[in-house]
Image: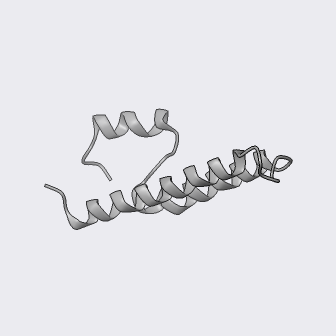
Amino acid sequence: MCSVLDVARLVNEITVTFVFVTAVFAISDQTSNANNIAPLALGLAFTGASLAVSSPLVLALNPARDFGPRVCCPDVR
């Protein structure tokens, strides 16, 4: 059974993922003027997305570190 907190976490994760993917597309666009600073901008976008959701969701954006423990121990928070 999903609680209100689980729904809020899902909405939070979807929102941050949308913002991060939008930033990646905007930075990597060929008509963008950010070609010289694209690696820095992508790194800052990734860091911002990580910091935005790491504490409330106990999230690691590296699937190798995040997926396994969630499958083995879903009740641990």
Position of residue 8 relative to residue 46, above or below, is below
Towards the viewer: 47 or 30: 30
Among all residues in the image, which is located at the extreme left?
1
- State the image coordinates of residue 45 (x, y, percent, origin top left): 65, 55
- Which residue is at 71% across, 50% downward? 27
Judged left or right of residue 22, residue 75 is left
- State the image coordinates of residue 23 (x, y, percent, origin top left): 63, 54
The chosen color scheme is one colour
Towards the viewer: 37 or 63: 37
Among all residues in the image, which is located at the extreme right?
36
Judged left or right of residue 28, residue 33 is right
| Quarter of the figure with the N terminus | bottom left
Position of residue 53 relative to residue 74, above or below, is below
Judged left or right of residue 30, residue 58 is left
- Which residue is at 38% across, 33% downward? 68
- State the image coordinates of residue 17 (x, y, percent, origin top left): 49, 53
Q: Quadrant of residue 72?
A: top left
Towards the viewer: 45 or 29: 29
Give the mark count: 0
- State the image coordinates of residue 3 (x, y, percent, origin top left): 19, 62
Towards the viewer: 9 or 54: 9
- Which residue is at 48% across, 32% downward? 64
Position of residue 52 relative to residue 42, above or below, is below
